[in-house]
Image (tube, helix red, strand yellow):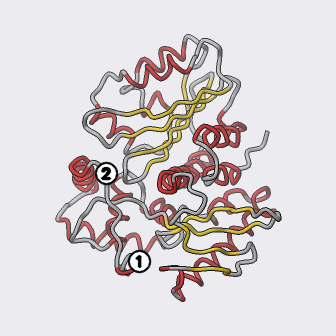
């Protein structure tokens, strides 16, 4: 089967279904790439605490019978290393082989998989500044080198998995969540806007983003999948996620939800400087951070330079250490906003 990459992104933003259905939809959409005949797994986790690494949910699909979910969950809950190392592991890797990226932390996982004929796992780690995330693994029968294409596509998809998971936590399944700030038609016509979305620049940006999204969902999704996934950034202007909504008469709308990425409360930084610094602290490249936040790469570089200078750190490693300390100290990063809820301009 040919992988429809946008179908995974669309599944990530299903905020109208329960958690099991959401995970199942993501796995089903990912199956052409993840499942090589030995199944796949998905788990939701929280790595923000020093006290424990919390696996909130684990789902196993299409796997050999001997790999039952309860046993697999126990393997993740009994790591060789402490929770701080777990957080470091999950907090810096977006895509890779479990043997190379996670094997030192979870040696028993690979041993158990080998008994079922599984030699390795391809891992996709979708995480944001809260250090909470979704983790997908595809079981593979042999060791291999990962392709650049796969890395590029899964890294972008991970941005949407993280955004979708964050939005689900924020909305809590409410039919009319307070996160809704704009409603648009697939044509880009804006039917409703409130709060920050009412501003002229925001309206223009949202309309343009919806048009790009709809173009990506046309022939481009099949003929030019890399361009299609690139056209749908992780956030719009570092604030909004776009989600389909279907009315009872069958009409489809695109809803813009406020879905700011969490950040530590670095008072000396502007909200966007905090966002960029937090994402860089997760080991993400400037280019990837630009995609995650929906900003220009040049803007990310400028914001990072300002943040590093204000925080007094001299390297990305120092920034990452400071970030993890702040997350642990505050239990979970805060989302700080400017007047009327809009992040001030950088």
Q: Quadrant of the C terminus?
A: bottom left
In this rendering, the answer to whether 252 lies above or below 82 is: below
Of residues 343 and 6, the one drawn nearer to the viewer in this rendering: 343
Of residues 206 and 196, the one drawn nearer to the viewer in this rendering: 196
How crowded pointer 1 is (Cα within 10 Å; few <14, some 14-19, many 20+) is rated as some
> Residue 302: horizontal and vertical position, in percent?
35, 74
Q: Earlier in the sequence, mark 1 or mark 2?
A: 2
In this rendering, the answer to whether 89 lies above or below 74 is: below
Judged from the image, the secondary structure of the residue bearing numbered disc 1 is loop
| Residue extending furthest toward the left | 312
User: Residue at the location (47% across, 23% down)?
Assistant: 73
User: Residue at the location (37% across, 64% down)?
Assistant: 275
What is the count of numbered marks?
2
Residue corresponding to mark 2: 332
Q: Quadrant of the N terminus?
A: top right
User: Residue at the location (24% across, 57% down)?
Assistant: 315
Q: Is residue 9 left or right of residue 128?
A: right
Q: CA distance from mark 1 to mark 2?
A: 21 Å
| Residue 22 image-quadrant placement | top right
Q: Is residue 246 left or right of residue 320?
A: right
Judged from the image, the secondary structure of the residue bearing numbered disc 2 is loop
| Residue 105 image-quadrant placement | top left
How crowded pointer 2 is (Cα within 10 Å; few <14, some 14-19, many 20+) is rated as some
Residue corresponding to mark 1: 342
> Residue 192: horizontal and vertical position, in percent?
63, 79
In this rendering, the answer to whether 301 lies above or below 89 is: below
> Residue 250: horizontal and vertical position, in percent?
82, 63
Is label 1 in contact with label 2 (beta carbons under 8 Å)?
Answer: no
> Residue 241: horizontal and vertical position, in percent?
56, 64
In the rendered structure, find residue 307 and report the number of the disc placed on it.
none
User: Residue at the location (51% across, 34% down)?
Assistant: 43
In this rendering, the answer to whether 268 lies above or below 171 is: below
């Amino acid at each position: 089967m040919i992988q429809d990459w946008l179908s995974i992104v669309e599944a990530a933003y299903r905020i109208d279904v329960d958690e099991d259905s959401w995970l199942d939809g993501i796995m089903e959409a990912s199956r052409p790439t993840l499942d090589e005949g030995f199944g796949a797994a998905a788990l939701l986790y929280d790595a923000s605490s020093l006290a424990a690494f919390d696996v909130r949910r684990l789902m196993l699909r299409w796997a050999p019978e001997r790999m039952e979910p309860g046993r697999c969950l126990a393997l993740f809950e009994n790591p060789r290393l402490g929770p701080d190392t777990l957080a470091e592991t999950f907090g810096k890797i977006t895509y890779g082989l479990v043997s190379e990226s996670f094997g030192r932390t979870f040696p028993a996982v690979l041993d158990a998989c080998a008994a079922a004929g599984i030699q390795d796992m391809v891992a996709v780690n979708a995480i944001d500044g809260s250090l909470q995330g979704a983790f997908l693994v595809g079981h593979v029968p042999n060791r291999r080198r990962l392709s650049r294409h796969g890395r590029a596509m899964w890294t972008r998809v991970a941005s949407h998995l993280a955004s979708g998971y964050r939005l689900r936590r924020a909305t809590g399944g409410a039919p009319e969540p307070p996160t809704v700030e704009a409603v648009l038609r697939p044509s880009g016509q804006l039917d409703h806007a409130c709060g920050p979305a009412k501003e002229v620049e925001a309206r223009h940006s949202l309309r343009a983003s919806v048009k790009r999204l709809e173009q990506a969902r046309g022939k481009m999704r099949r003929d030019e999948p890399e361009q299609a996934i690139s056209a749908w950034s992780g956030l719009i202007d570092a604030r909004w996620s776009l989600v389909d909504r279907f009315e009872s008469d069958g009409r489809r709308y695109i809803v813009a939800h406020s879905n700011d990425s969490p950040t530590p409360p670095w008072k000396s930084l502007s909200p966007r400087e905090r966002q960029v610094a937090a994402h860089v602290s997760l080991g993400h490249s400037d280019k990837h951070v630009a995609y995650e936040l929906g900003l220009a790469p040049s803007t990310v570089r400028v914001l990072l330079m300002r943040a590093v200078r204000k925080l007094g750190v001299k390297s990305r490693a120092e920034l990452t250490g400071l970030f993890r300390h702040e997350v642990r100290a505050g239990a979970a990063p805060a989302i700080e906003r400017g007047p009327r809820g809009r992040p001030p301009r950088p």
